[in-house]
Image: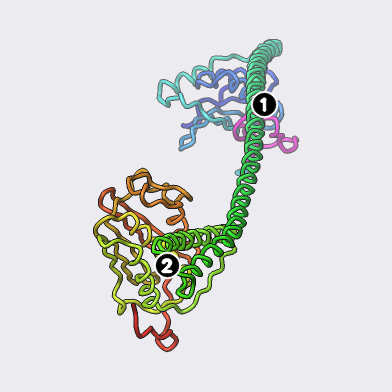
Amino acid sequence: MSLGATEPATLAAYDLTTPQDVFALRRIGQSAAEALGMDRQDQVRIATALSELGRDRLGCEGLTVSFALPPGPERVLAVVFGWTGGAKSAPDLDPASRLLHRVRHETGGGRERIVAEHPLPTSWVDSTDARRGVVDALRRHASPTHAEDLREQTRDLITALEESRAQREEMRRLNEELEETNRGVLALYTELSQELEETNSGVVALHAELEEKSARLRETSEAKTRFWRNISHELRTPVNAVVALTRLLLAPDSAPLTDEQRRQLSLIDASGQSLLSLVGDLLDVAKAEAGQLEINAAPTDLRALLAQLGAVMRNTGTSDVALLMPEPSALPVAVTDEALLTRILRNLLSNALKFTEKGEVSLEFRVDAPWMVFTVTDTGVGIPEDELSKVFEEFYQVRGPLQRTHRGTGLGLPYARTLTELLGGALRLSSTPGAGTRVEVELPFTPVPPTSAPAAPENTP
């Protein structure tokens, strides 16, 4: 192999005329790759690719090969095979293309070329001394014999086999680690699946238990409602008889009674009236819980309703407690259920009067569209804060000194709130022990035009 003329970017150039030149080209390519800092694998790739290209083009006229480090942004080692002619067909670039970064065939100017390029390592630093070292490596090898080339190829093959064996060993180790990881993941997945299945079983069992308890609660509530409804009906008949017979005995045309007999009959009549009212409340509560209490909304004159209610409630209070009612001129005609509204306010005023020894009980009214608000306040004993949430429980009664003299059933506030909600409203309560209680009833307000409103009574008590 003889050196040819070189261009400024070319490190070295050689003529290729004999098979020994191709053998030498293999060693020269490997030596150049080593001087450029490429790893062993790239060295073998370059040597093998150059040997294949040289053997394919050997016999072409004017065949040369040159090594260069061309300027430009892409740092590569460029090996160029050039020739002027020959009887060979187009070059076979496939073997070299599988080994190197880029291989192309060019023609022009009466000369053909194969340009093979491979990127330089990132550690390569281009300098005069570095280029001189590469040139020395290119010139270092004399033309080898065929036997020497075979030995070199054998050494390269052994090196490649050792590298392949090491890679297989590393691959085997990685596969074992992957299998171990997969076994751990599978075991964790199985454990989580079992825990999830156990949790789901517990949730299903808990849901079934809750469903069973809910069904029992519904049955209990329905049984309680049936009991209230039945006992109310059963009590109403004898109570009506007691009240009727008492009134017959008290009638002016009945047989004369002594003062003591008349007083005792009056007590019987009052007790019968209270018991009859209680039975009616129980029946209404049962109907409301069963959804059977009907609402009969109609134009209602609040002046007449509150005037009559005030007259009745004043007779139940004491002289030490003043009952204050709203001004009749401030009361409109509204569409509501007159009977239910009367029961709500009667229960609230009765409670306020019952637990107020001195001071006043007042009923106030205002319109806060789209609501009408009734507010009952008193100066009574009040309710402790820890019992505010319990007073709406049926049959619950706040313990206190007045409880012994004013016995009740504990249905007043629950009954009033049930009827308020049935009318589409809300009942709110606040209280301070020793200062009194405030109850606010908020109901939907539907005013009635004056032309359709019922006439107010001429004499309002």
Q: Which mark is residue 190?
A: 1
> Residue 443 bears which disc, if any?
2
Residue 423 visible in the displayed image: yes
Q: Is residue 107 above or below residue 174?
A: below
User: Horizontal and vertical percent for residue 256?
Assistant: 45, 69
Q: Which sits in the foreground, 22 or 279? A: 279
| Disc nearer the start of the sequence (2/1) | 1
Q: Which residues are magenta?
A: 81-106
**Residue that appears at 51% across and 28% down:** 120
User: Residue 125 in the image: x percent, y percent?
Assistant: 42, 25
The N terminus lies in quadrant: top right
Q: Is residue 192 magenta?
A: no
Counting labels gives 2
Q: Is residue 169 left or right of residue 342?
A: right
Question: SS class of the residue under badge 2?
Answer: strand
For disc 2, the neighbor class at 10 Å (few under 14, some 14 to 19, many from 20) is many
* Residue 97, magenta (yes or no): yes
Q: Quadrant of residue 29?
A: top right
Q: Which residue shows up at 25% across the image and 60% down it? A: 320
